[in-house]
Image: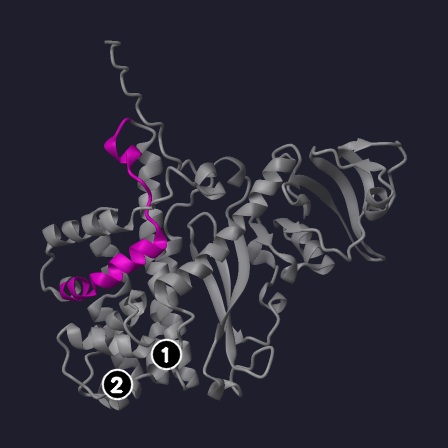
Amino acid sequence: MTGDELREHLREVLDADAIGALIAKYGIQERERKLDVFEFVVALIMAGGTHEGGRQYDVLRTYVDNGAPRVVRGTFYAWFTEPLLKLLTELLQRAIAIGQRQPKLLPGILGGVTDWRVFDSTTVRLDDRLVDTFPGAGKYAALKIHKEWSVGTGNLLSYAITPARDHDSPQLIIDERRRGTGLLIDLGYASIERLVECDMYDVQYVLRLKENWKPKVDRLVRGAVFRDEVEGADFDTLLDEELVVLDGQAIDADVTVGRGRMKVRCRLVGIPTPKGYCFFLTNVPRKTHGPHQIGDLYRIRWEIEIDNKVDKAGARLDEITARRPVSARILVLATLLNTTIARTIVQSEKLAVVAAKKTPSEAASRPPLHAILLMRALASAHGTITRLLQADTPVLPEWRKLMSRLRDFGSDPNWRRRPSVLDRIQGLTAPPMPRRPRRAAP
C-alpha cells in the first residue's frame, strides 16, 4: 500500500463529510454541542492499541490530546449512546465492504471455491452489573462475538453480538448465498443436517470428526488393513480391532455418516501428528486435494483464532469495563473497526509482496505486515491521522511518510523464521538469502 492508497483507504472509512452526514442522520451533534464527533470517533477507534488506563478513559485522553475541548468524565461517558452505536454500525459495515472489495489470495489448494470462510466466536467478560443483558455461562456477565472470516481477503466478513450463554451453531446458516464457497469449522458447528445442506448448496467443507459420530466405511482408498472386508464396517470398530493400521501414513476413505433419512456420504481423512492421528470429514474432491492438503486446509481455520487474538492484543477487546450495555456494544464495534481497517492495510501489503515476487523487485524481499504491530503503530500515530484526515487539501508527502512509518514498525518479525500455513500457501515466505562469497583461504 502506498501513501496515496493509505489516504484513500482511511478517508473512505473515516471520511469527515460522511461522518457528518451520519451525525445529522442520528441527531448526535444537537444532543452534545461541545462534542467534536469526528475527532471522538477517530479517538474511539484508534485508542484501542494503548494501555495507559481503561478503554473509555484512554479514548477520553486521546480525544483531548488531539486538541478537542476538555470535558469531565461523566459528560464524556454520557456520549456513549444509541445514536453513536448506530453510527459505528454503519462505519463498520462500510469498512467490511471496503475490505471485501480487495482481490482474494487463493492460490494452490485454496482454489476451487470463490472463497474459504471460517466461523468462530470469542467471549468477552463484562462488568457483572450487565448480567441481565449479557448473561454468561455462569453467574457472571459476558458477551459473545460471532465472526465470519474470509481467508481470501484475510478480513472480517460478518459478525453478530449475543449474550455469551447463546450457542454458536445457530449463527451459521447454509443457504443459496453460500453456493460455491468453502467452509472451515470446528466441532461447535458440526451437525449431520449442516453437512446435508453443504451438499445441497455446493459448499465444500472441512471439519474435525466428532467423537460420537460413527462413520461407516464404504471404501478404503488409502491406508493399510489386515483384512479386505472393511466395506460397511464401523470405522471406530476397525480401529478398535486394529483392522485398519495406524502406521504413520495418511488414511483416506469414502464413508457414510448419519442414520435413516439424514445420511451423508463424504470423505474421512486421517493425518498423523506428533499427538496422534487427526480425523477430518470433507467433501473436497480427492482429485484436487490429497489427505495432507485437507489437513493443511483445516489448519488454516486457526487464522480466526489469531484474529481473535488480534482483537484482544491489538485493540483491547478483553478490557471492556463499561457499565451500560450500549457502551459495551460501542467498544466492541470500535474494536472490530480498528481490526478491519488494519487488516485491509495488511491485505494490500500482501498483494503487493505477492505481485512483486513475479518480477525482480526490492518489494519481493519486503516482509508483510503483522496486524497487531500495525495496530499499535496506527494508535501511536492517531494525532497525525486525525490531522491529515481533516486537512482541506491532500498532504501527500505526509501520507507517504506515515505509510513508511507504519511499514517500519508494523513489519512481521516471523516472516523468515515462522511462516504460517496460510503464508506458505499464499507465497508469503521470505526469498532465500543470497549466498555470501567464500573467503579465499589464507
**Residue 138 appearing in the image:** yes
Q: Indicate the quadrant where residue 371 lies.
A: bottom left
Q: Nearer the viewer, residue 70 or 392?
A: 70
Disc 2 residue type (three-letter) = Phe
Disc 2 crowd rating (10 Å Cα; few below 14, some 14-19, many 20+) is some
Magenta stretch: helix, strand or loop mostly? helix
Q: Which mark is residue 189?
A: none
Q: Is residue 431 magenta?
A: no
**Residue at image mark 2:** 76
- Tell me if residue 181 comes above or below residue 142 in the rendering: above
**Secondary element type, mark 1:** helix
**Residue at left 48%, top 76%?**
125
Q: Position of residue 27 (x, y in %)?
A: 28, 85
Which residue is rendered at x = 68% and y = 53% of the image? 200
- Number of labels in the image equals 2
Q: Quadrant of residue 296?
A: top right
The residue indicated by pointer 1 is 85
Residue 371 drawn in magenta:
yes
